[in-house]
Image (tube, rainbow, N blue to C red):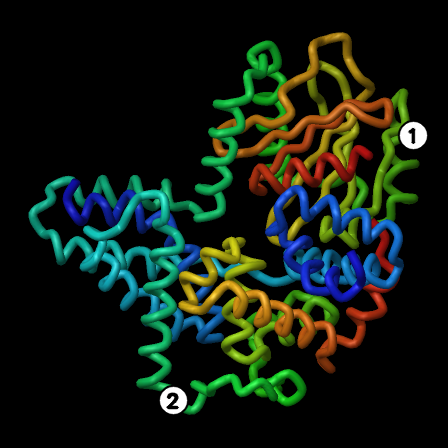
Amino acid sequence: MNCNEAAATIAAYADGEVDRLRSHTIRKHLRTCPSCAAKHQELLALHARIRAEIPYFKAPSALRERVLATFADATPARGDRVRSADRWRWMTGGALAGCAATIVAWVIGTAIVDWRTNEDLAVEAVTTHVRATLGNHRVEVASSDQHTVKPWLSARLDYSPPVRDLAREGFALVGGRIDYLDRRPVAALVYRYRDHMIDVFVRPPTTHAPPAALRTVRGFNVAHATRSGMDWLAVSDLNAAELSNFVARVAQ
Amino acid sequence: MSDDRRFEELVLPHLNAAYNLARWLARDANDADDVVQDACVRALKYVGSLHGNEARAWFLTIVRHAFYDWLGRNRPSEIVQDDGTALDTAIDHAAVDPEQSASRNDQTQALVDAVAALPLQYREVLVLRELEELSYKEIARVADIPIGTVMSRLARARALLQRSPLLHAVAGNMSGSER
């Protein structure tokens, strides 16, 4: 493949729209051609910035009410309209959440993963995340500087959790806190991605079987990785695919 | 399944996607409201012809039609044909969304403004791709253009963003990025 041919397909490749055979050819070219590789990087960087910085506007609740009313007018005979409207207010909590739930359901349904043993851990992680959110106890050390957050945590634990700066990928470090998981104090790193808050609990690996890579608990996604000599458990209302991407990066 | 049940189960879950698209097309909250309401009325009317697995693209197609009809009635001057010269001249500097500026830093705001300033044809494919995460094939269907045109418009949208005077800072950031 030469640069002209590559130029025509780099964007489609970055968008995941190229078949496997052709992807392989492009990857080979990108490894040997710095100028095409730079173009590819620029596309990925722009994509990351758009995803991180461009707001996704959710339908205001007033609009949702009006739509439900329109459609109640169109079908006045339904006696359970109110209850139905209530149910939908919950269930349409976000098209993204809906998609994420579908992906998670599919991933969990098809991958035969024994998450049952670790169900308690994922549930506890979600509970801890929710408690921190509700109690406004999100961070004890607020800083976007990994060199501030890491020593603060190390000083309060018997291990030193790696802290990565992922601002370029759109994950802004907000800070950290000490929390409790599995009856032990753990480091909780807090990142923000668009409007989503992510808690990632970092601890030395335990002797238990590793949890499932991905789970959903009460609508929250929980992604797990064991890397860099640590156990990583990320919890967020962010969609499953992006949370998996995040945990892979933060743990690398 | 009755039409209202189908609407509830297949279409309503995509209300946020519909609103986001309408909001980025119209660049105004109240106008987006009107467009989405109109789209819902249409969707309820035609929901009988919808196949379940394509509800999102189907509904977004309706939203887009509703938007263009609304545009024709309210801001006909914005409907311009793409004659290929738009790349260098098309940035719409008037299109800044003051609502968004409150708590964002300048860099972020620059990107938001640059996207809002993209000409409509480029803005819509960019939003469908980057925010709604539709495939090229789905975008082709929603925007009623061939896949080749989807690709060329996306490429132009991105080139416009990268070259936008609203965010020269992006270029610096990107050349330093390593993955």
Instruction: Name the secondary structure under disc 1.
Output: loop
Whether pointer 2 and pointer 1 mark residues with C-beta atoms closer than 8 Å, the reply is no
Q: Amino acid at mark 2?
A: Pro
Q: In what quadrant of the picture does the N terminus of chain B appear?
A: top left
Residue A11 appears in the rendering: yes
The answer to which of A94 and A19 lies nearer the viewer is A19
Q: Residue A7: percent from the left, percent from the top?
A: 73, 64
Q: Residue furthest front?
A: A1
Q: Residue A108: percent from the left, percent from the top?
A: 52, 24
In percent of the image, x 30 and y 65: which residue is there?
B39
To which chain does the residue with label 1 belong?
A
To which chain does the residue with label 2 belong?
B
The residue that mark 1 highlights is: A155
The answer to which of A17 and B47 lies nearer the viewer is A17
Residue A177 vertical placement versus B79 (above, below):
above
The answer to which of A75 and A252 lies nearer the viewer is A252
In percent of the image, x 72 and y 35: which residue is there?
A247
Instruction: Name the secondary structure under disc 2.
Output: helix
* Mark carried by residue B76: 2
In percent of the image, x 80 and y 63: which residue is there?
A3
